[in-house]
Image (cartoon, rainbow, N blue to C red):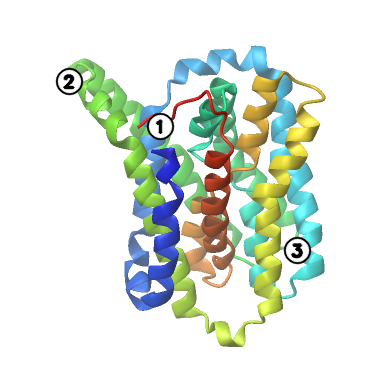
Amino acid sequence: MLKFFSLPILLAFALGYQFPYIALNLSQFAFIILFLMMTSMAIDLEWSIVKKLASNKKEIAFGLFLQFLFFPLFQWLLARHFINDKSLLYGTFLASLCPVAIVAPSFSKMFNADEELSILLVIISMFLFPLALYVAMILTNNSLHLSPILIDMIILVFFPVFLGLVLKWLDKNFFQNNMIKFWKQIAAEFNMFSIAFLAFIYFGASVAKINLNYTSWTEILGVLGIIFFQDFGVYFLSKWLMRKFFSEEKAMALCISISMKNMAVSGAILLFYDPKASLASAVGFLIHAIFFNFLVIHKPKKVVLDN
C-alpha cells in the first residue's frame, strides 16, 4: 500500500486547486478526520512497546533533540530570512514542530530499520508536541491566540489516546479482538485516503480564503523551500549524522522518523485560526507525497512491500 501512498495526495492537490470552495465547505470536517486518524493510531499501537524506552534512551533523546530543537531552530532562522509575511512565517515554523508522522514506522519497516524505535518516537513526540508548541510560541512572541490553539492540540493528542485505549479494552473483553483485527486490515487505506482528504481541504481552503494573486510568489517559494528541506534536507543530514553514532537499523529509523512530520495536526488547527498560516501545512502534504515516492523508489530491493 505504501507504494501508492503519494498518488491520492497529488490528486487531492489538483482537485483542491480546481474546486477550492468545495474544499472550504468541507473544512469543518478536518478536525474530525484528524481526530479519527489519531484514534486509529492509538488503536493500532502496541503500548507494551513503551517498556523498551530504557534500551533506546540515547537514540530517543538524540532524535527528540533534532526533532524539536535543532532542526526547528534552523528552519526558524531560514524562515525569518526568506519569509516576511507573518502568517506564513509562523505557519512554516509550526509545521517544523509537529510530531512524527503516523506512517513513519511503516516506512522504517520498509527499510529494514528499527520499527519499534520509530513507534516510540511517534508516541513520545505526540505527547511532547503541546509543550514544544507552548514554549516555541512564547519564545517567538507569536501573535496567534495561544490558549485556544493549545487546548485544541491537547484534545487532538490526549483524547484520541484515551478513546483508543477504551476501544481496545472493549474489544478485548466483548469482541474477542475481532474489531481491532478488522481495523488493522483497513487502517493503511483509511490513513492514506484521510491524508488525501485533508490535503484537499487544506490546500483548497487556502486557495479559497487567500487570493494567491496578491501573495508574493517569493514568499510561497520560501515556504516550499523550507518545507522541502524539512523532508529531504532533514532526511539526508540526519542519516549522515546518525550513522556516526548508531547502528544502521537505528540510524535509518531515526532519520526516517524525524524527516516525517505530522503536519495534519498543524493544518487542522491553523485552518480555523489563521487560514493563511495553514498554507505551509498544505504545502507540506505535497512535499510529503514527493518524499514518500522517493523512499519507495529507493527502498531496499530485497524487501517486499506489504499489500
Distance between the alpha carbons at the discs numbered 1 and 2: 18 Å
Q: Which residue is mark 1?
A: 42
Question: Residue 36 appears at what percent x and percent y?
Answer: 34, 44
Q: Which residue is mark 2?
A: 175
Q: What residue sits 69% from the left and 74% below the top? A: 219
Quadrant of res 128: top right
Q: Is residue 134 visible to us here?
A: no
Relative side of 275 to 7, left or right:
right
For the N terminus, the quadrant is: top left
Q: Is residue 217 visible to us here?
A: yes
Residue most toward the left?
174
Q: Count how many numbered circles sit on residues in the image.
A: 3
Q: Which residue is mark 3?
A: 79
Q: What residue sits 48% from the left and 31% below the top? A: 106
Question: In the rendered structure, which amino acid carries the disc numbered 2?
Answer: Phe
Q: Earlier in the sequence, mark 2 or mark 3?
A: 3
